[in-house]
Image: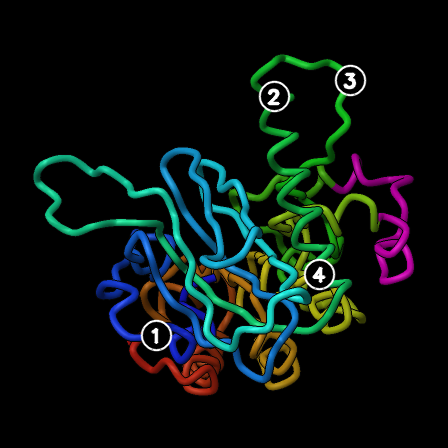
């Protein structure tokens, strides 16, 4: 999540201040009262909100209200009983100290309108599980009712580099011995883990392998990467051609590229001569994403 998703058109008048960046992405502070335009009478309003301490959010003129927890969370509000096409929301004023002259309400990173009851329930489930997990961790609970909100999985055991010669820093042989007897990871196996990954707020692949090599890579990304749940993985960049890029575009995915060299000559000394092709593919990904400013130069 790195932008105010399709919510800019929903923000009415002077409801919010200028967009800022906290290192995790863009957001804007709302005023203690702010208005949202409701498009096409959508039933559910999803907000990604940040707050330093607990507050109460309510819809003005309605009995509907929500407690907002400290931290960043997604909230989904069922507007079935509300007829307004313009919603005014009120949040406890945030006191940032005497140096702050603005009247601050809450940090807003995303506004999403949608009509899926399943998605609404999913957003609420993920937040409830995350809050429960944090409470259990702080209390030192031994038996947990929550599941990990930050989930790690291993998608692929093969590597297109280590199959010839493992990188000098890679403990390839030892890990491959440890993997003996582990279940094969595929889409059907992932579906059996639904109680875990569907309640996670973030999923990271930690394979000792190359994730895009998996035959069902695109289908797996499509299943677990949602607007509200990020999927991240690390790749050596050697399989970032059109097929892989197509699987990533338009999805909430964080890609970490491990190139390990600043020049083609340096790359060739300890790996192979694919350096220039890797950069071409990464530049193509940047262009296709429409964000040329992030291209490697």
Q: Which residue is mark 3?
A: 143
Q: Are marks 2 and 3 in contact (CB under 8 Å)?
A: no
Which mark, by number, is residue 253? Answer: none
Residue position marked by numbered label 2 in the rendering: 137
Measured from the top left, where is residue 248 in percent x and y? 60, 74
Residue 204: image location, x then y, percent = 62, 50
The answer to whether residue 160 shows anywhere in this view is: no
Towards the viewer: 5 or 120: 120
Depth-wise, is mark 1 or mark 2 nearer the camera?
1
Numbered disc 2: secondary structure: helix
What range of the chain is rendered magenta? 176-193
| Dot 3 alpha-carbon crowd within 10 angstroms: few under 14, some 14 to 19, many 20 or more | few
Q: Position of residue 86 (x, y in %)?
A: 46, 74
Residue located beneath label 4 in the image: 224
Q: Earlier in the sequence, mark 2 or mark 3?
A: 2
**Residue 51 lies in quadrant:** top left
Task: Tell us which disc is closer to us: 1 or 3.
Answer: 1
Task: Please state the horizontal and vertical placement of residue 269, each as a whole percent of the image.
Answer: 43, 62
Q: Residue at left 25%, top 60%? A: 20
Residue occupying the far front of the picture: 61
């Amino acid at each position: 999540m790195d932008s105010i998703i399709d919510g800019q058109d929903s923000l009415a008048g002077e409801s919010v201040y200028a967009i800022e960046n906290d290192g995790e992405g863009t957001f804007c502070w709302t005023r203690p009262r702010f208005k949202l335009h409701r498009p096409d009478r959508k039933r559910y309003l999803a907000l990604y909100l940040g707050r330093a301490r607990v507050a109460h959010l309510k819809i003005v003129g309605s009995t509907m209200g929500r407690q907002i927890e400290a931290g960043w969370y997604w909230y989904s509000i069922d507007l079935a009983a509300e007829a307004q096409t313009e919603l005014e929301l009120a949040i406890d004023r945030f006191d940032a100290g005497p140096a702050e002259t603005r009247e601050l309400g809450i940090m807003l990173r995303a506004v999403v309108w949608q009509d899926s009851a399943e998605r609404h329930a999913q957003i609420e489930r993920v937040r409830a599980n995350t809050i429960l997990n944090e409470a259990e961790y702080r209390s030192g609970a031994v038996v947990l009712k929550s599941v990990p909100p930050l989930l790690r999985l291993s998608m692929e055991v093969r590597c297109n580099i280590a199959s010839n010669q493992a990188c000098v820093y890679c403990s390839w042989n030892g890990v491959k011995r440890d993997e003996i007897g582990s279940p094969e990871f595929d889409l059907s196996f992932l579906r059996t883990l639904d109680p875990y990954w569907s309640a996670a707020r973030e999923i990271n692949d930690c394979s000792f392998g190359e994730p895009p090599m998996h035959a069902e890579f695109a289908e797996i990304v499509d299943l677990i990467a949602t607007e509200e749940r990020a999927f991240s993985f690390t790749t050596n960049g050697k399989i970032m051609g059109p097929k892989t890029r197509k699987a990533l575009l338009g999805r909430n995915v964080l890609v970490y590229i491990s190139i390990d060299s600043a020049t083609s000559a340096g790359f060739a000394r300890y790996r192979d001569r694919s350096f220039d092709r890797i950069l071409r593919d990464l530049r193509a990904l940047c262009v296709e994403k429409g964000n040329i400013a992030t291209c490697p130069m």
